[in-house]
């Protein structure tokens, strides 16, 4: 079967990992620190902390911000469960809102209606690698300043709700010419195996807060938080006579390793090539399916935002969820792997049990019920993309006539 999204692993990647194994330093060390610096340079943010996953990074960031019981964080209902889970883990309430009908991103109108005096943060999600409307979100946050009730010194310093971008999909995407990671107050990336840039598992927190925050101190603080609250990491402790350390707070264990960073350094060095190839595949799908009256092509680029083409989310017009499923099954039968991104959270048992109802999110359900994600990855050939296009067309007509 043609796979959906295998990672780009070649001899260059293998050599870098072997070099790390031979170096004797496989946990957090020099390559992790270099990877952080390279991400900061690429993104243009003020500092970066590499972590074990998007999920752990975002949870630590929310807890630093002071999110807890009684607080609310606005998220789109159309996202992966991690976006809601990290809020629930803090004891706060994820306030799920609907999405725009023109793309898969959070609706500004829905955000505005959801803001209350308990709202402490907004978490936009750049679905498929297409940035959200961050100017619009910033304007809503500014307008809501009178409602904002800071609960600690960090919140007082910012003086408004935090914009914490779920940029799991959008490494390499741009908003008004700026790289994602330098747009929101805090952005969390995912480097999971299926992402455009992978470290197998892993992620990064990019900080771009106002200058009233000391980003050098933030970096030091988060390095402590992600390593059990320990005052020194292993690299620092290995210096001559520097074995003694303290534990400054009961922290977390979610540091990135040099083995992961080794993969990331290779990926980052050739990321322009990766993006160019993904754009070519995206455009080949758009051209191959764009003239079909039943095919709704996703947005890749608009005036102020450019996707990094993490996903190609095809919507099929005028079909039911069951018909979409039947079309997918026909595609599977032709040995092509496709997927759905995502099931809206209110459809899932964990969140239905908490009282979320999909009936409150009609746009998200409509978009989901007609969505099929097509394979898009660096090693996918032009001939394979043509084959996927033909397979989708045949599957549609077999089901719909």
Image: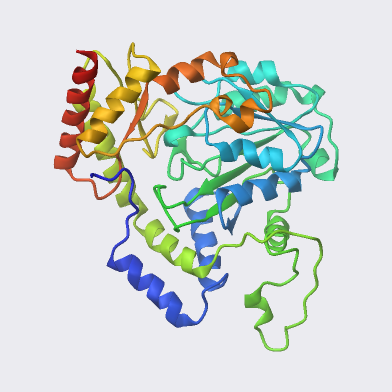
Q: Is residue 322 visible?
A: yes
| Residue at screen point 79% across, 34% down | 159
Residue 120 position (above or below residue 39)? above
Location of the N terminus (image quadrant): top left
The residue under the point 75% across, 63% down is 229
**The quadrant where residue 297 appears:** top left
**Would you say 212 lies left or right of 50 here?**
right
The answer to whether residue 215 is above or below residue 98 is: below
Residue at x 69%, y 19% (from the top left corner): 114
Quarter where residue 28 is shown: bottom right
- Is 104 on the left or on the right of 66, as rendered? left
Q: Position of residue 237 (x, y in %)?
A: 68, 80
> Is residue 385 shown left or right of residue 311?
left
Furthest residue in direction bottom, as rendered: 240
Residue 178 placed where, x, y %? Answer: 49, 40
Could you say where residue 392 lies in the image, as x and y percent from the top left?
A: 22, 27
- Which residue occupies the foreground of this view, 152 or 136? 152
| Number of numbered discs visible in the structure rendering | 0
Q: Is residue 326 left or right of residue 62?
A: left
């Amino acid at each position: 079967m043609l796979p959906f999204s295998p990672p780009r692993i070649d001899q260059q990647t293998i050599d870098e990992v072997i070099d790390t194994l031979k170096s004797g330093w496989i946990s957090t060390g020099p390559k992790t620190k270099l990877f952080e610096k390279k991400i900061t340079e690429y993104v243009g943010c003020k500092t970066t902390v590499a972590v074990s996953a998007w999920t752990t990074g975002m949870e630590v960031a929310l807890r630093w911000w002071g999110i807890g019981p009684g607080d609310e964080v606005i998220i789109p209902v159309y996202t992966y469960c991690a976006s809601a889970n990290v809020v629930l883990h803090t004891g706060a309430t994820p306030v799920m809102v609907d999405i725009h009908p023109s793309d898969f991103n959070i609706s500004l109108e829905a955000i505005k209606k959801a803001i209350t005096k308990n709202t402490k943060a907004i978490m936009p999600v750049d679905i498929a690698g297409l940035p959200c409307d961050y100017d619009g979100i910033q304007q809503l946050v500014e307008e809501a300043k009178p409602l904002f009730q800071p609960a600690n010194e960090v919140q007082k310093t910012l003086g408004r709700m935090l914009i914490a971008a779920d940029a799991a999909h959008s490494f390499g995407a741009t908003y008004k010419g700026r790289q994602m990671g330098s747009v929101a107050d805090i952005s969390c990336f995912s480097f999971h195996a299926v992402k455009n840039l992978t470290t197998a598992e892993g992620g990064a927190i990019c900080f771009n807060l106002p200058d009233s925050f000391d980003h050098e101190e933030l970096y030091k603080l988060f390095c402590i938080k992600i390593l059990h609250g320990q005052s020194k990491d292993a690299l620092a402790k290995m210096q001559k006579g520097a074995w003694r350390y303290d534990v400054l707070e009961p922290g977390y264990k979610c540091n990135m390793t040099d083995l992961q960073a080794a993969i990331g350094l290779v990926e980052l060095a050739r990321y322009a090539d990766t993006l160019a190839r993904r754009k070519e595949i995206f455009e080949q799908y758009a051209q191959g399916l764009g003239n079909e009256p039943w095919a709704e092509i996703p947005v890749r680029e608009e005036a102020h935002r450019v996707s990094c083409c993490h996903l190609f989310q095809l919507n099929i017009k005028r079909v039911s969820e069951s018909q979409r499923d039947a079309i997918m099954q026909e595609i599977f039968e032709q040995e092509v792997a496709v997927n759905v991104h995502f099931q809206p959270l209110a459809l899932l048992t964990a969140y239905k049990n908490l009282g979320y109802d999909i009936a409150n999110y009609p746009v998200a359900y409509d978009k989901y019920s007609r969505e099929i994600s097509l394979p898009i990855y660096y090693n996918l050939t032009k001939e394979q993309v043509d084959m996927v296009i033909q397979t989708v067309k045949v599957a549609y007509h077999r089901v719909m006539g």
